[in-house]
Amino acid sequence: MVIEPQTAAALVPAHIAPEHPIVTRDYSLFTLAIHDMANTMAGWLDDQADGATIFGPSRFGKSSAVNHWLQRLLSERHGGFVPMVVWSHIDSGTAQSVGRFYANLLQASQHPLAHAVRSPLDRQHMLIERWMAMAAQGRGRFLVLVIDEAQAMTQREWIWLVELHSTLERQRIRLCVFSVASLQFFDEPMGMALSGGAHVAARFMLLSKPFHGVRNVQGTGLCDGRLRQHMLASRIGYLLLRRPGTQSMGRRPAHGASGRRPLQRDGR
């Protein structure tokens, strides 16, 4: 079917600036599901768990929660900086060797020599030194590793992670591994146990919690003043401009000379 140009609806309404976060998709909206996820992880940290899993369907906002909210919320909960490394496994790809595995973790830790040519043992020493320095920044001897898209991890990578976890324990550094994965990861512990990786499942996969995403209007947290202050748009205030003149639910459009509503920083 051919749509006549004069009848086709505009992809971006005229009153929304093309650089608006809604158009560029450069934003993250705080939700009750993210709030619950952070509280659950904070409880696991309080219980000194070695590892745990958050799982849920794709496109439910798990990665957005990890990349934009988790460290901030955990730091608020614990009253200080929580050292954290977020490793997106899907971005780095599956490691075919232990040296590549350490290089991926060095890159996730923002080590300046992550891409330098080094032996696997040298990369392991660099990673441990980096993580010890990060743990010291949190005035403690623990570090949180969050593995996003963990369903793509191979058994070899899990075994290398167990070895790294044991090495850090000998250095008296407690590493807590949070896996964030899609629904198929729910059967991973049993699969690990049946294929000879029971020690991996016992260490990192005994605890789990589903991520439900937004299930109703109240799940966005927009009606709660305390949650609304957490709205984020990559350092630019989040203005949900669905139609001209809308100023409800905490939105404050500022009218410019051109009639467009310009972006406002820090939500003011």
Image (spheres, helix red, strand yellow):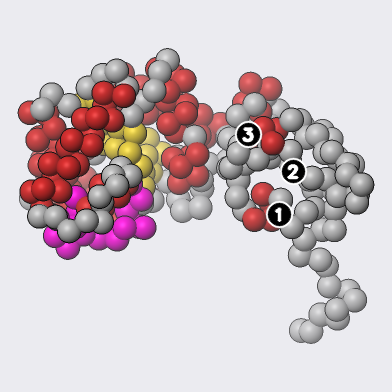
Residue in the picture at 76% in, 84% down: 1
Label drawn at residue 19: 1
**Residue 19 picture quarter:** bottom right
Alpha carbon separation for disc pair 2 and 3:
14 Å
| Mark carried by residue 231 | 3
Q: Determine whether the residue tagged by mark 3 lies in a helix, strand or loop.
A: loop
Amino acid marked by disc 1: Glu
Q: Residues within 10 Å of mark 1 (few under 14, many from 20)?
A: few
Q: Position of residue 159 (x, y in %)?
A: 12, 48
Give the residue pinned by disc 2.
Answer: 263
Q: Judge whether 250 appears above or below 53 on screen.
A: above
Whether tag 3 and tag 1 are in contact, CB under 8 A, the answer is: no
The residue depicted at 81 percent of the width and 66 percent of the height is: 10
- Please tell me whether residue 238 belongs to the stretch shown in magenta: no
Residue sitting nearer the eye, 130 or 190: 130
Q: Amino acid at mark 3?
A: Met
Amino acid type at circle 2 is: Leu
Left or right: residue 239 compared with residue 96: right
Front-most of residues 64 and 15: 15
Crowdedness near tag 2: few (<14), some (14–19) or many (≥20) residues, C-alpha within 10 Å: many
Task: Return the disc, 1 or 2, that comes first in the chain's sequence.
Answer: 1
Q: Position of residue 240 (x, y in %)?
A: 74, 43
In the structure shown, which secondary structural element does the residue marked by tag 1 occupy?
A: loop
Q: Nearer the viewer, residue 191 or 19?
A: 19
96 drawn magenta: yes
Mark 2 vs mark 3: give the one in front: 2
